[in-house]
Amino acid sequence: MTGFEDENDEYERYGLYFDEPIGYQIRADGSSLALYYAEIKIVKGGNQYHVIRRTKPRRAR
């Protein structure tokens, strides 16, 4: 899991850090930030999923 469980969240979430960049975030000023973390969101009780490159794990709101 990504550090916490949210009972109201519709997804199971799992994350993984990589040694090399897996993508880049392009900012409005033209600079870029290397992304080393990815999260997979799986619909609870289903078989649909979505992979997201992120800067760090998701945090509770």
Image (cartoon, rainbow, N blue to C red):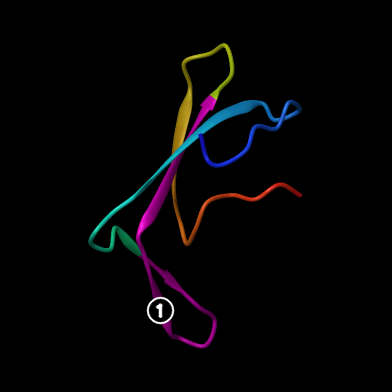
Q: Is residue 22 magenta?
A: no
Q: Position of residue 7 (x, y in %)?
A: 73, 26
Q: Position of residue 18 (x, y in %)?
A: 28, 54
Magenta stretch in the rendered image: 24-42
23 or 59, which lies in front?
59
Q: Position of residue 5 (x, y in %)?
A: 65, 32
Q: Which residue is mark 1?
A: 32
Crowd rating for badge 1 (residues with CA inside 10 Å; few <14, some 14–19, many 20+): few
In the picture as drawn, the residue positioned furthest to the front comes out as: 3
Please name the residue shown 46% across and 28% down the image. 49
Q: Is residue 23 left or right of residue 14?
A: left
Mark 1 falls on what kind of element?
strand
Q: Is residue 59 left or right of residue 47?
A: right
| Chief SS of the magenta region | strand
Please name the residue shown 39% across and 54% down the image. 37
In the picture as drawn, the residue positioned furthest to the left comes out as: 20
In the picture as drawn, the residue positioned furthest to the top comes out as: 45
Query: In the rendered image of this protein, does residue 38 appear above or below residue 46?
Result: below
Query: In the rendered image of this protein, does residue 60 appear above or below residue 23?
Result: above
61 or 48, which lies in front?
61
Please name the residue shown 33% across and 62% down the image. 23
Q: Amino acid at mark 1?
A: Ser
Please name the residue shown 62% across and 38% down the image. 4
Q: Is residue 39 magenta?
A: yes
